[in-house]
């Protein structure tokens, strides 16, 4: 745990710095992926940048709206400090909507663009887990496993490290299937299936998971839904491809 | 082609079954509130805050009901909880800002005096830190996730239970509102 980095008199939040690095990394990866997929790299990069910016602003704006009485007499507080006070669901919604609008405006092919965005998503998730590991609020359940990490005197599952491994697996799958891509959107669906399947598994080891009133992990319920939808779409895409090949023959 | 469809259907079924089973295994028990003997006290907004007496890191006895007459904020935390460390400075700032008008009280969960006192010294906390080595206060308040913050009005009634890291502006706003109402 290294929540802050001290540079002389300057104390910077580690997670904030890592998030900025993550955004840059994700954008760079998306640009390269678009080039490898023969897409419009500039437009795909811009789409990713617009989505990240919209997600950040949306997450903060909706938090401020929901907590308006806290900011009514403290307008400067809306823009600083930014180390807490974001609505995750709102950020995701704004990012997706901004991406859809930008993609439509620029007439980008949806499925192929998602293929180019997939390694960016994986990179971003890896970096978010890294930030959480150094200075975030997440922590795992207690364990006696040899790979346990010491969190302020208690040995716990390194859930963020598990999440990083899943992100790396999703990223690796993109490169592994790049040459064997048989339909647009396949790379995105494979990455999504691997990442959601992995999160379904490791969220069981998170100590402060979001729970339903009956005690089920909310992230696991979301993950299994995404996993099943992505595997279904993968299967359908491959079957349709086979059908097309046979009808051509 | 039929074989391929069958294969994908079987894969989906297996994933659904395994995933569902894993979610079921991972299910966590929900809190059982330990206040059934007194219907007017419950760790829920709208009920009287469950009373308790415990010692602080300064060696003094602290009774929650003694704080009636001013808004009180209970912050449940532990020294090993990363998000508790993130928000501790917010409570310190609020305790200085509302000094004499509202009370900020930290309630530890299941740690000995040395751990609680060390944490308080490390974070520079000057508000009272209550010990709860057997976690009986935490059970009274049904604390299942850390940190948890309970806002109590001047009449001793719980107005809000906030789970997770609280934002500094939100914390100060909640106390402000309780002060204005009082």
Image (cartoon, rainbow, N blue to C red):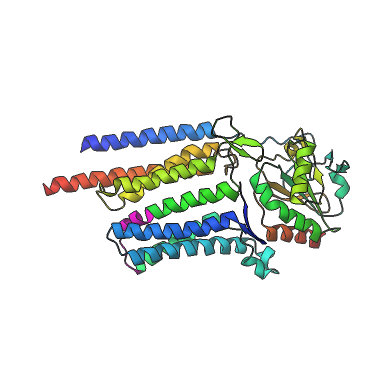
Rendered image quadrant of residue A10? bottom right
Task: Residue at the far front: name it.
Answer: A8
Rendered image quadrant of residue A83? bottom right
| Residue A142 vs residue A55, the one in the foreground | A142
| Residue A100 vs residue B94, the one in the foreground | B94
| Residue A213 vs residue A87, the one in the foreground | A87
Residue A110 in view in this figure:
no
User: Magenta segment: does it hold B78?
Assistant: no
Taken as a whole, is the magenta stretch helix, strand or loop?
helix
Q: Where is residue A135 in the image (x, y as percent from the top left)?
A: 60, 50
The magenta-colored residue range is A106-118
Task: Residue at the far left: name it.
Answer: A249
At 57% from the left edge and 58% from the top edge, which residue is drawn?
A: A16
| Residue B156 vs residue B7, the one in the foreground | B7
Tell me if B94 is positioned left or right of A196 in this view.
right
Q: Where is residue B107 in the image (x, y as percent from the top left)?
A: 77, 43
Q: Position of residue A235 (x, y in %)?
A: 29, 42
């Amino acid at each position: 745990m290294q929540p802050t980095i001290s540079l002389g008199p300057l104390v910077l939040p580690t997670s904030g710095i890592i998030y900025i690095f993550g955004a840059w990394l994700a954008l760079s990866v998306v640009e390269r992926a678009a080039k490898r997929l023969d897409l419009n790299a500039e437009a795909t990069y811009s789409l990713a940048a617009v989505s990240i910016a919209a997600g950040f602003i949306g997450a903060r704006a909706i938090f401020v709206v929901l907590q308006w009485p806290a900011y009514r007499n403290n307008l400067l507080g809306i823009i600083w400090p930014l180390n807490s006070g974001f609505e995750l669901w709102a950020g995701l919604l704004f990012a997706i909507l901004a991406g859809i609008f930008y993609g439509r405006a620029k007439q980008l092919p949806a499925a192929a663009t998602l293929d180019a965005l997939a390694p960016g998503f994986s990179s971003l998730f890896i970096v978010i887990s890294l930030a959480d590991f150094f200075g975030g609020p997440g922590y795992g359940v207690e364990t006696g496993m040899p790979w346990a990490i010491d969190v302020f005197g208690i040995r716990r599952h390194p859930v963020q490290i598990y999440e990083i491994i899943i992100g790396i697996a999703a990223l690796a799958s993109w490169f592994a299937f790049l040459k064997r891509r048989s339909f647009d959107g396949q790379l995105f669906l494979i990455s999504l299936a691997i990442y959601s399947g992995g999160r379904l598994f490791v969220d069981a080891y998170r100590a402060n998971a979001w729970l339903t009133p009956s005690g089920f992990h909310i992230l696991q319920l979301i993950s299994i839904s995404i996993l099943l939808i992505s595997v279904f779409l993968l299967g359908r895409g491959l079957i349709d491809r086979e059908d097309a090949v046979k009808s051509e023959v | 082609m039929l074989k391929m469809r069958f294969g994908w259907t079987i894969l989906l079924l297996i994933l659904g079954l395994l995933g569902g089973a894993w979610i079921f295994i991972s299910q966590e028990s929900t809190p059982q509130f330990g206040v059934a003997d007194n219907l007017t006290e419950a760790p829920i907004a709208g009920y009287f805050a469950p009373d308790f007496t415990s010692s602080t890191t300064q060696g003094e006895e602290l009774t929650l009901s003694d704080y009636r007459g001013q808004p009180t904020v209970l912050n449940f935390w532990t020294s090993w909880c990363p998000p508790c460390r993130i928000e501790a400075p917010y409570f310190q700032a609020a305790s200085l800002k509302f000094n004499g008008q509202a009370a900020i009280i930290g309630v530890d969960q299941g740690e000995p005096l040395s751990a609680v006192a060390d944490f308080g010294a490390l974070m520079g906390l000057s508000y009272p830190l209550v010990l709860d080595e057997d976690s009986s206060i935490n059970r009274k308040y049904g604390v299942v996730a850390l940190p948890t913050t309970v806002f109590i009005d001047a009449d001793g009634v719980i107005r809000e239970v906030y789970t997770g890291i609280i934002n500094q502006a939100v914390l100060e706003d909640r106390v402000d509102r309780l002060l204005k109402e009082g």
